[in-house]
Amino acid sequence: MKLKPPMQPSTLPNQLPAQLPVPDASALAHSQQLQKILLQRIEAAGGWMGFDTYMETALYEPGLGYYSGGATKFGPAGDFVTAPELSPLFGATLARPIADWLRASASQVLEFGAGSGALAAQLLNALGSQDCAPEQYFILELSGTLRARQQETLARVAPQWAERVRWLDALPENFDGVMLGNEVLDAMPVRLFVKHEGLIRERGVASHRGQCVFADAPADAALGAQITALETHLGGALPDGYVSEVCPAASAFIASVAACLQRGVVLLIDYGFPAREYYHPQRTQGTLMCHYRHHAHGDPFLYPGLQDITAHVDFSALAHAAHDAGLTLLGYTSQARALINAGITELAANLDRNDLATFLPAARGLQTLMAESEMGELFKMIAFGTGSTNFDTTLFNQGNRHL
Ligand SMILES: C[S@@+](CC[C@H](N)C(=O)[O-])C[C@H]1O[C@@H](n2cnc3c(N)ncnc32)[C@H](O)[C@@H]1O
């Protein structure tokens, strides 16, 4: 992945890398409408906007953003595939620790950013079969179009539990139970920075001949202080020319979660690293990445509203913010290790091999979930608890890692 240098026009639609599919006319018109809004807002802000504002608009602008405008496509025919789309074993396995946590708290689940609703359906079915179906399953979803898709998935895949699902517009004031989110943190807006002649500059967005382009500006005090604190944590200065990102939105998110979680566990699953790996001196271009119909590339200005924009998660920063907000770290490990700890191999062994229509996709998905070269190592699970010391940590007992 390579970020474009400042002030270079982004790839124009007629200069696309050959392998990227071209959207149809109505999708292009949708994207151009969003692009117009972005350019107007850059102009109104004096010619420059932070990359976090650009990313938030491109993903969540009501009716037009990638997640809020109906363009999101999950699964093999879409832009990217997430773990619950790969195999129902993912949700069935997570239901085991979640059942334990529900027994040690109230019988309710709150899922953030439930995407297509696949994980909610898998969890409800698996918890139901353990006689532990939550009394309420809440979904907090930013996108109205995704809510509709989740309702459809639940009615089709978990009809006996669908009436227990409620959608929320905001975090509840007090929550007792289990909260979880798969690939939610990576969809939160990031601030880009560049180290230039020993100084921190913020990489934002300007307009150039009707296109959004990168443009650097002096860092404000908050960003400067955050990078200074990061360099202190890392034990040395980042090298000159270094480009990366920070995600204050993820820290603010975990602080809000902590403020409303009275008793229970929050489990977050995503791709990322601890700070020492994230900000490794050799990772000189950060982790910003775009996904468009299963093509990963580095141009966030291509087709705004039609492509996903994402960055890896700094789990050290997340753990730090959670600690400051009063949550206790229950554990942190790779997805493969956590799923093994929770018994995925046992569940896989119990699949009916004669039912090829179910067995083959589940087995294929298992390979992608677990393989070190695919999701097994890059993806991590982290959990925090509060209000009790009785939360089971089997998910992390083998292979728990330091942050
Ligand atoms: C990459 S998708 C993952 C969807 C789903 N969890 C899955 O695994 O397939 C990111 C999701 O996070 C949601 N999201 C992002 N920020 C959020 C927030 N602060 N609160 C709730 N949902 C959020 C998006 O609307 C979207 O549904």
Image: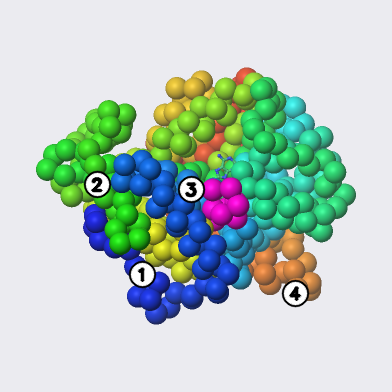
Amino acid type of the residue tagged 1 in the rendering: Leu
Q: Main secondary structure of the magenta part?
A: loop
Closer to the chain start, of discs 4 and 3, is 3
Disc number placed over residue 216 in the picture, else none: 2
Disc number placed over residue 356 in the picture, else none: 4
Amino acid type of the residue tagged 3 in the rendering: Thr
Residue 63 inside the magenta-drawn segment: yes
Q: CA distance from mark 2 to mark 4?
A: 55 Å
Disc number placed over residue 57 in the picture, else none: 3
Residue depicted at 67% across the width and 53% down the height: 145
Q: CA distance from mark 1 to mark 3?
A: 20 Å
Amino acid type of the residue tagged 2 in the rendering: Asp
Residue depicted at 66% across the width and 39% down the height: 140
Q: Are marks 4 and 3 in contact (CB under 8 Å)?
A: no
Look at the numbered disc 1 and give the secondary structure of its residue. Answer: loop
Give coordinates of residue 235: x percent, y percent.
22, 34
Residue 2 inside the magenta-drawn segment: no
Closer to the chain start, of discs 2 and 4, is 2
Look at the numbered disc 2 and give the secondary structure of its residue. Answer: strand
Q: CA distance from mark 2 to mark 3?
A: 19 Å
Q: CA distance from mark 1 to mark 4?
A: 46 Å
Of tags 1 and 4, the one toward the viewer is: 1
Q: CA distance from mark 2 to mark 1?
A: 21 Å
